[in-house]
Amino acid sequence: MKHETLQQFVSDARKIVFFGGAGVSTESGIPDFRSVDGLYNQKYDYPPEQILSHTFFEHYPEEFFRFYRDKMLPLDAKPNAAHLKLAEWEAAGRMTGVVTQNIDGLHQAAGSRKVFELHGSIHRNYCMKCRKFYPPEYIRDSRDAVPRCSCGGRIKPDVVLYEEGLDNDVVSGAIRAIASADLMIVAGTSLTVYPAAGLIHYFRGKHLVLINRDATPMDRECDLVIHDKVGEVLGSLA
């Protein structure tokens, strides 16, 4: 019944916005953070939350990149049914945008162009000294423990670490997309990471839908809640 209701919401909507988290990519083989087998429940010398902080990057770059190469560069991952469905809707002119907390670039790989990457992307890497661009393969394949630019500067992935702020232009674009939509689908996120999670409060449209494997703090505020895998749900829609 819930899937039929979602199908009706989608069929009636003229402008759809999607807000997604790590659970959108788990069906592509990328682990999330907070589930039983997520990154935060794996054993390292330091907690992942600490490793993925600006302070840790500055003071322990070798340990940062050891973890980053091991867990944050899923370059062989492919888009799943959720990514493909969203790209299909955008091609049909029905999407105001995809707002994502993910850094894997799978939305773009599926064909989406209106993507607001709140936490950056593994596909952009810059020298902190001269700003020269490097692809993620350079980080992965570098023989140096800490990847260096040709000028000698340290290379930093263009991802938002803990203690770092979000990009103002990305946030502004995401807010515009959310505010102009009449249907918002929130999926694959625990809605516990701020300030990103707070953006959904800019939605003033007709229907708010939440698709997530587990319950979230926003369940009671949504018009429809489906506790299931995101790819399976969206992939079943016309």
Image (tube, rainbow, N blue to C red):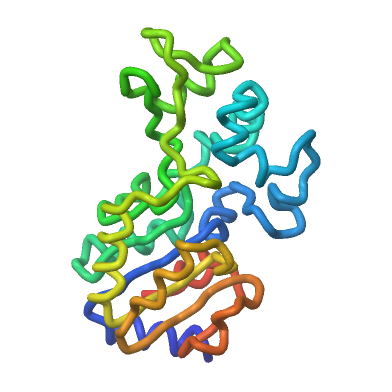
Q: Position of residue 204 (x, y in %)?
A: 31, 84
Q: Position of residue 50 (x, y in %)?
A: 67, 42
10 to the left or right of 161: left
Q: Position of residue 146 (x, y in %)?
A: 56, 17
Question: Is 148 or 60 nearer to us in this picture?
Answer: 60
Residue appearing at x 42%, y 57% in the figure = 100
Residue appearing at x 30%, y 67% in the figure = 175
How many marks overall?
0
Residue with the most extreme left position: 93
Residue 179 in the image: above or below residue 104? below
Residue 27 in the image: above or below residue 128? below
167 to the left or right of 228: left
Question: Is 165 or 23 nearer to us in this picture?
Answer: 165
Residue 204 in the image: above or below residue 131? below
Residue appearing at x 51%, y 72% in the figure = 233
Residue appearing at x 46%, y 72% in the figure = 186
Residue 79 in the image: above or below residue 88? above
Location of the C terminus by quadrant is bottom left
Q: Position of residue 231 (x, y in %)?
A: 51, 64
